[in-house]
Image (cartoon, rainbow, N blue to C red):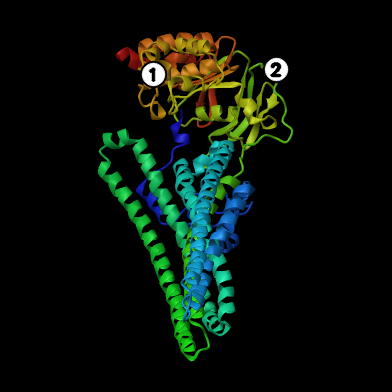
């Protein structure tokens, strides 16, 4: 495989630019095409690629992105109704406590009060407390249920959409960062839905109803108290706007840390083999410190915001209580009324104070929701046409490239294929050779329509690929990559990935043909043995033989072999090559090869250089022509003779 066609740079400069605020996504859901042009990672791009800063700026000041969360939550109206009812009852019960205390003081503690009368009012107060406890339990259950359910639905929806996207999207946007979004960001949304929203609504209800109750108890004192409300609200918005931006940046830094951990742990053998543990430790330390620095800004803003709001709220309440005490002394208010006013005032002040804190959490949740919404709203660049054409049945296995020019989205300045034309006949075996970077692997990716060329056309059995559903195209291919790609599952599931409904006999036959059945049966649980993450419990040759068996099981009319025997020892290669020879009969086969000895029997050898075909013919013809193939062959076969 031409790894240079998909390589990314993981240099210190590249990481540093990301940790300073760049994001692979624009908030509008479009991948950032030029990271350097968007150092803050907050600019949308219109269809012409021009940055649009208006929408992100507005979004930074609002809770608008949480609408995505609400869209998922409202799919469960019954649970929402129960949660809302429990929320309302618990809020009313909380406000019922000062009303009960007022009755206890004014009627139970009145001079000459009857003990039985006192007991009656305390029983009333105790009933309120019991109702509050039961309602709170119901509120906790249903709200927590909604949080878990919504997060599960969002994760599933994001994953479904990611499965639709073309490989180009994952070249421009790190899969490790996407994985971090689906873990850290959904955890924040779970907290918002399961806790923060409940707290916000409960305190909003208590603030509104408590305010009304305060005005009913003592209008004069209440007017004095709520003169301070505008002074309290202004800091909420001023600090909230800044907190929203810092919270978004904090989540980006957390995603960077998660992506780096996944990358380094996945390549631990390479890290240790080259003695880069200290460098990776230092690089991770920088990422952690960048995360901590951003978190400190967020914490500082929230701390100052909370201090100011609580000081204003309770300061105003204290002054009002001072005046109320004087009114009690003068006989304008009863003792029970001032007790109820004090308790209700504390509840209302606490509610407003809690709202300032949960507002910051809601803004943080809005940042997480906007990042996930970007993934949800991303549309695939390779999509089925409105009216897809059907491929011929039975399949013929012909493949045609006509004047194809293609540039990878991440490298638009250089063409991987230039005016490339190739006709592959049904049942023909075509070997594709050439130096690294010549465009060999690009042919495979275009054939399976992972990309569309910028010029020219590609046809499968005479039908243009752009007119066919991509899923129907890929059903006609079986692919064996250069590195056997396995999944974190047991051997059986890895084998039947090529045909999930395959029978046990078919699985065994494919494994036997790929010279894999013997070592698979020797595993501790046979085919039910877990192979480890990416098949790490197997050797490279064993992984490759499972990949070959998977392609054998698919039994597709066109076979794509990307140096399929490169990881095998001589004995295994001979056995697998015999199996491949049987499989290739009556099938169209394209073989990418660096080891020319494996393609000498091909019907035709296509020699590529710099995205163009420079030679084609049989091994004998090309060897006699004295061109690039002859030079490559002489070098390789000379090395073999010398060995």
Q: Is residue 392 above or below residue 85?
A: above
Query: Residue 246 appears in which quarter of the rendering?
Result: bottom left
- Neighbourhood count class around disc 2 (C-alpha, 10 Å): few under 14, some 14–19, many 20 upward: few
Cβ–Cβ under 8 Å for marks 1 and 2: no
Residue 52 in sight here: no
The spot of residue 166 in percent (x, y) is 57, 37
Tell me if 417 is positioned left or right of 180 in this view.
right
The spot of residue 524 in percent (x, y) is 35, 17
Residue 234 in sight here: yes
Which residue in the structure is indicated by mark 1? 542
Q: Nearer the viewer, residue 589 or 468?
A: 468
* Farthest right residue in view: 387
Q: Secondary structure at mark 2?
A: loop
Which residue in the structure is indicated by mark 2? 393
Q: Which residue corresponds to the image point at 58% horizontal and 63% vertical from the top-left?
A: 58
Q: Which label was assigned to residue 29?
A: none
- Neighbourhood count class around disc 1 (C-alpha, 10 Å): few under 14, some 14–19, many 20 upward: many
Q: Nearer the viewer, residue 65 or 410?
A: 65
The spot of residue 318 in percent (x, y) is 44, 81
Q: Secondary structure at mark 1?
A: helix
Q: Nearer the viewer, residue 444 or 125?
A: 125
Q: For the C terminus, which image quadrant? A: top left
Q: Which residue corresponds to the image point at 36% horizontal and 43% vertical from the top-left?
A: 261
The spot of residue 35 in percent (x, y) is 49, 52
Q: CA distance from mark 1 to mark 2?
A: 35 Å
Q: Earlier in the sequence, mark 1 or mark 2?
A: 2
């Amino acid at each position: 495989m031409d790894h240079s066609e998909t390589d990314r740079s993981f240099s210190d400069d590249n990481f540093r630019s990301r940790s300073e605020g760049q994001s692979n996504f624009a908030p509008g859901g479009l991948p950032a095409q030029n990271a350097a042009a968007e150092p803050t990672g907050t600019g949308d791009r219109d269809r012409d690629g021009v940055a649009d800063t208006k929408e992100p700026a507005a979004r930074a000041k609002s809770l608008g992105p949480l609408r995505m969360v609400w869209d998922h939550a409202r799919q469960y109206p019954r649970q929402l109704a129960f949660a809302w009812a429990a929320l309302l009852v618990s809020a009313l019960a909380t406000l019922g406590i000062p009303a009960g205390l007022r009755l206890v003081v004014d009627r139970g503690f009145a001079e000459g009060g009857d003990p039985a009368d006192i007991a009656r009012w305390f029983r009333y107060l105790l009933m309120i407390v019991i109702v509050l406890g039961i309602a709170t339990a119901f509120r906790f259950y249903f709200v927590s249920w909604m949080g878990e359910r919504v997060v599960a639905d969002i994760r599933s929806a994001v994953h479904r959409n990611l499965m639709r996207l073309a490989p180009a999207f994952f070249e421009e946007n790190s899969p490790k960062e996407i994985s971090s979004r689906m873990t850290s960001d959904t955890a924040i949304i779970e907290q918002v839905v399961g806790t923060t929203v409940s707290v916000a609504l409960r305190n909003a209800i208590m603030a509104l109803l408590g305010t009304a109750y305060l005005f009913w108890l003592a209008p004069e004192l209440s007017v004095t108290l709520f003169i301070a409300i505008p002074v309290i609200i202004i800091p909420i918005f001023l600090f909230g706007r800044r907190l929203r931006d810092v919270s978004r940046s904090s989540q980006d830094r957390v995603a960077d840390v998660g992506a780096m951990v996944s990358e380094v742990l996945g390549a631990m053998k390479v890290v240790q083999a080259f003695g880069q543990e200290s460098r990776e430790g230092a690089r991770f330390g920088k990422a952690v410190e960048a995360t901590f620095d951003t978190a400190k800004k967020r914490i500082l803003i929230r701390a100052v915001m909370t201090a100011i709001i609580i000081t204003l709220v309770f300061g105003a309440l204290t002054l009002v209580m001072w005046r109320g005490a004087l009114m009690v002394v003068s006989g304008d208010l009863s003792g029970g009324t001032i007790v109820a006013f004090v308790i209700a005032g504390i509840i209302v002040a606490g509610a407003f104070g809690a709202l300032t804190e949960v507002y910051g959490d809601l803004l943080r949740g809005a940042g997480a929701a906007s990042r996930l919404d970007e993934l949800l709203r991303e549309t695939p660049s390779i999509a089925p046409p409105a009216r897809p054409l059907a491929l011929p049945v039975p399949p013929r296995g012909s493949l045609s490239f006509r004047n194809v020019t293609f540039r990878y989205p991440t490298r638009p300045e250089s063409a991987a294929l230039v005016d490339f034309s190739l006709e592959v006949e049904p049942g023909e075996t075509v070997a594709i050779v050439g130096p690294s970077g010549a465009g060999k692997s690009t042919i495979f990716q275009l054939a399976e329509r992972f990309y569309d060329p910028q010029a020219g056309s590609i046809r499968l059995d005479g039908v243009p690929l752009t007119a066919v559903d991509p899923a129907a195209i890929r059903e006609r291919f079986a692919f064996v990559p250069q590195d056997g790609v396995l999944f974190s599952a047991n051997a059986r599931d890895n084998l039947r990935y090529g045909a999930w409904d395959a029978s046990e006999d078919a699985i065994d036959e494919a494994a036997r043909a790929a010279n894999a059945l013997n070592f698979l049966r020797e595993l501790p649980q046979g085919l039910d043995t877990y192979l480890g993450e990416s098949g790490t419990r197997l050797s490279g040759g064993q992984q490759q033989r499972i990949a070959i068996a998977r392609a054998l099981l698919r039994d597709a009319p066109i076979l794509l072999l990307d140096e399929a025997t490169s990881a095998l020892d001589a004995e295994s290669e001979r056995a697998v090559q015999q199996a491949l020879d049987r499989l290739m009969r009556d099938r169209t086969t394209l073989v990418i090869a660096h080891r020319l000895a494996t393609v000498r029997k091909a019907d035709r050898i296509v020699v590529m250089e710099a995205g163009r075909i420079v030679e084609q013919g049989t091994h004998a013809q090309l060897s006699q022509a004295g061109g690039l193939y002859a030079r490559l062959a002489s070098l390789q076969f000379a090395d073999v003779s010398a060995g």
